[in-house]
Amino acid sequence: MNEGKKFEHQFHKSLEKEDFYVLRLIDPPSSFGKDSTKVRFSAKNPYDFIAYKEPYLFCLELKSVIGTSVSFQTEEEAKQKLNTSANIKWHQIESLMKADNFDGVKPMFVINFRKTNQTYAIPIAEFVTYTAAMVKKSINEQDCIKMGVLIPQTLNRKSYHYNFQFIYEDIHSANHLRATLRRICPKRMPIGTSQQEYKEWCDTMYKLLETIIENGTKKGSI
C-alpha cells in the first residue's frame, strides 16, 4: 500500500471512530495502475469520501504529498487536456463546487504534507477564491494555512488518528464564517457555474458579511 493510500485508510478509520457515517467512493481502474483504455467506461470519481454526522454531509477529496507543494489543474487546462498529472484535477474542483450549492453540505480538500506531518481541511470556496488570484498553479503549506484549518492528529503506535471532529465542531460553531455566509446567502449558485462566476459570488458574500459586521451585528446573531 503506497503512502497516499495509507493516509486515506487511516483517515477513513479516524472518521469511523468519531462516529461519522463514511462512504469511500470506488476508484476507477486507472487509480490501481490498470489500463483504463481497456475498459468500456473510464469513470472519474468526483471526490474520495462522503462522511455524514448530523446535520452535515462532508464531501472530501484527500491528497497526501511528499513534496512541499500541491499542483492543480485549471478549467481551461482541462478543456485542452493539459496538466493532466496535477495533484488536483479540475473535475475534482468542479465536483466540490457543485456540492457546495446545497445547504448542509461541506465540500473540502484534506491535504496532508508528509514532510512536515501536517494536515489541513480547506473548504472549496476558500480554495477557489484564493487560487483564482494566483499566477502559479500550485499551493504550498503556507497557502493551506491561509485557506484552511489545521486538523489535529495523534500517533497511535504505527498509525495516525486525525481529529476531524475538531473541524465538525468548528463548522458547527455559530461564529464560523462559512455557517454565517450560508445564513445570509440570498441564492444558491446554479449547477454548472464557471470558476470565475463562483469566485465573484464568494467575494460578494464576504463583502456582505463585512457590511453586516461593520453595522454592529454581533457574531452568531444571524
Image (cartoon, grey):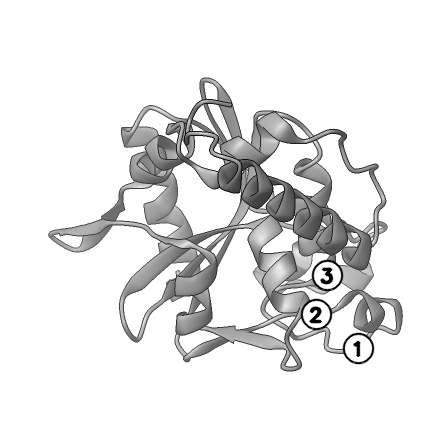
Instruction: Say what secondary structure mark 1 lies in.
Output: loop
Mark 2 crowdedness (10 Å alpha carbons): few <14, some 14-19, many ≥20: many
Q: Nearer the viewer, mark 2 or mark 1?
A: 2
Say which of 158 and 36 sits in front.
158
Whether label 3 touches label 1, CB < 8 Å: no
Tell me if 132 is positioned left or right of 168 in this view. Answer: right
* Residue on which disc 1 sits: 82
Say which of 214 and 145 sits in front.
214
**Residue 118, above or below 142:** above
**Residue 87, above or below 127:** below
Residue drawn at the location 51% of the way across and 23% of the way down:
222
- Residue 214: x %, y % from top left: 51, 42
* Residue on which disc 2 sits: 73
Decide which of tag 2 and tag 1 comes sooner along the chain.
Answer: 2
Tell me if 139 is positioned left or right of 189 in this view. Answer: left
Is residue 32 visible to the viewer in this orientation of the structure? yes
Tag 2: residue type?
Gln
Whether label 2 touches label 3, CB < 8 Å: yes
Q: Indicate the quadrant containing the N terminus: top left, top right, bottom left or bottom right.
A: bottom left
Residue drawn at the location 40% of the way across and 71% of the way down:
141
- Residue 217: x %, y % from top left: 48, 30
Is residue 45 visible to the viewer in this orientation of the structure? no
* Residue on which disc 3 sits: 90
Q: CA distance from mark 2 to mark 1?
A: 8 Å
- Residue 59: x %, y % from top left: 56, 39
